[in-house]
Amino acid sequence: MTLKWVLHWQPNAGSTVNSQILSEVSQCVESINGVKEGRWRATLTFYKPHTREQSMAVDFPRDFLGISLPEQPNKYYFIIRGQRIVLEADSSIQTLMEKLQSYKTRVALHFDGFQYQLGDFQLRVGKVVPTHSENLRGIVMEVEYVPISSVEKARQIMEEFLDIWQEAVSKRSLPGHFMHMEPNFAEYGLTDHYTSQHTAVQYATVMAQLIATVQAVQSVRN
């Protein structure tokens, strides 16, 4: 039994994400008695269709993501946001995709940070960086509540915990805040009983928000 909310750091208008904010957020977890347990890593990949004919590319999904989650090392998850599809596959599917070459990696993003224990909660806070780069693209936080696996039953306690967390973060006067945007899981054919597919869908939603934030900052600069 377990349930997660995946949040992303939303910078204030005119500000950007930086490693100092990540450091302050990590200190914030420890200030509310979070006990550091070790590293946490996950990888999300954006795929693009590999076709000889450019005109054929329109027949393939554009918003096609894959994600590996540390709690399910033998599984791999695909999300097509446009059609609201989520699939769980064996992790060997990645090798098969490389051999078939119907899709190629457009960009891979790594989530890298630490895991903390806080009573019945586990928090994971990490940076989002592209492969072969230290260029910080965002900050993501997982809030996991272990005793419950019902999305609806856990909602109140998750909201209450988030209120406590946001209050702790606000004391540090950081230029932004964590946002939780819950997808409509039913659109993906997912039930109230929480699974790793729910986590995968949340990451796809978070990435769409992070990309929109980066693009908004770039358009302001231009």
Image (cartoon, rainbow, N blue to C red):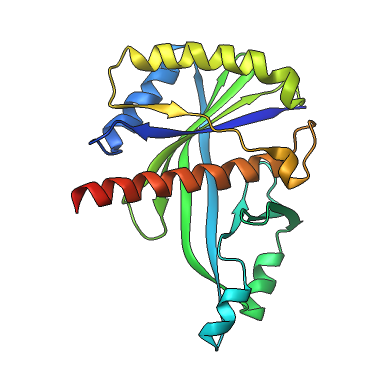
| Quarter of the image that includes the C terminus | bottom left
Q: Nearer the viewer, residue 68 or 8?
A: 8
Question: Which residue, as the protein is rendered here, is positioned at the far left?
Answer: 222
The residue depicted at 50 percent of the width and 13 percent of the height is 163
Give coordinates of residue 21: x percent, y percent: 31, 30
Is 113 above or below relative to 2? below
- Rendered residue at 44%/19% (across/down): 29
From the viewer's side, name the closer residue of 212 and 69: 212
* Coordinates of residue 81 in the picture (x, y in percent): 61, 53
Query: Within the image, what quadrant is residue 198 found in?
Result: top right
Residue 167: x and y, percent? 41, 11
User: Extreme bottom residue here?
Assistant: 52
Q: Is residue 162 visible?
A: yes
> What residue is drawn where x is 54% and y is 53%?
44
Q: Is residue 185 above or below residue 179?
A: below
Location of the N terminus by quadrant is: top right
138 up-or-down from 68: above or below:
above
Judged left or right of residue 165, residue 216 is left
Q: Could one spot residue 33 in this view of the protein?
A: no
Q: Residue 47 location, x and y as percent? A: 55, 66
Q: Residue at x 64, y 45 (%)?
A: 200
Tell me: 78 left or right of 109.
Answer: right
220 shown above or below 117: below
Which of the 4 image quarters holds residue 150? top right
